[in-house]
Amino acid sequence: QLQLQESGPGLVKPSETLSLTCSVSGVSVSSSTYLWGWIRQPPGKGLEWIGTIYYATTTYYSPSFKSRVTISLDTSKNQFSLKLNSVTAADTAVYYCATQIRNTVFGVLIGGWFDPWGQGTLVTVSS
Amino acid sequence: EIVMTQSPATLSVSPGERATLSCRASQSISNNLAWYQQKPGQAPRLLMYGASTRATGFPARFSGSRSGTEFTLTISSLQSEDFAVYYCQQYNNWPTFGGGTKVEIK
């Protein structure tokens, strides 16, 4: 059974880097069937896709985060990670990792829906 | 970026009644739409994909449809466990989510 679990600091200071890890069980992160994504949800608000990684090094980032985000894969630990630089209070949110189904549109690989999700971890940006 | 607009923001429905939720895409996305259900304190859970295919574990009272760029999620007879927030997400391009519809008890 595919399961994901986020981990990382719950408190980050403004201007610093938010770092989270998602541990995957039940399937190898090297699998070509799946993509691996990060989504966040500010308190009381909706869902925002941050970015996705697949094939170990290929990444796609939301334009909203592209200048300050890095997603990477660690196949030896069966994990993938999120780093978000120069955080502000607006980055306070529950951060979810999720499996994204492989999907192609007109022959171009585009991530599909997200299933399953990790339970989420709250990250607060405050001094 | 494809913008997804959900309406209404809040829907007040009595148990046993029908609920109809809408999601509109800013451009054509074919049937590349998913719905999620989120209960308080929980992660979103995939409810539907391909606009009308139910995910594992969801009963037949949940149905999805499409008309052009307008998508509808219908819950035919609301049960207590269905009161939640519902999000749509397009995957015709890199993903974007709608703002959500909260289905609350009337």
Image (cartoon, rainbow, N blue to C red):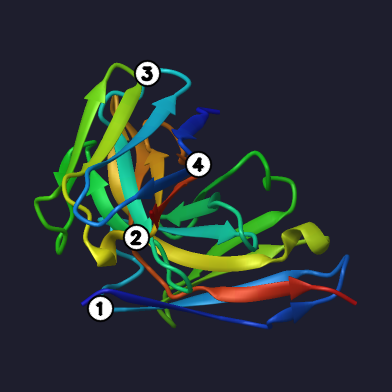
Q: Secondary structure at mark 2?
A: loop
Residue under pointer 1: A26
Report the front residue among A8 and B88.
B88
Label 3 and label 1: CA atoms lie apart by 35 Å
Name the amino acid type tagged 3: Ser
Residue A25's spot in the image, x, y percent?
31, 80
Marks 1 and 4: in contact by CB < 8 Å? no
Residue under pointer 2: B83
Residue at the image position 68 percent from the left and 74 percent from the top: A123
**For residue B33, which quarter of the picture?**
top left
Same chain check for tags 4 and 1: no
Q: Secondary structure at mark 1?
A: loop
Going from N to C along the chain, the mark reached first, 3 or 2, is 3
Label 2 and label 4: CA atoms lie apart by 14 Å
The image shows residue B100, relative to residue B43, as above or below, that is above
Residue under pointer 3: B28
Q: Secondary structure at mark 4?
A: loop
Same chain check for tags 2 and 4: yes
Q: Nearer the viewer, mark 4 or mark 1?
A: 4
Q: Secondary structure at mark 3?
A: loop
Name the amino acid type tagged 1: Gly
Residue at the image position 55 percent from the left and 64 percent from the top: A72
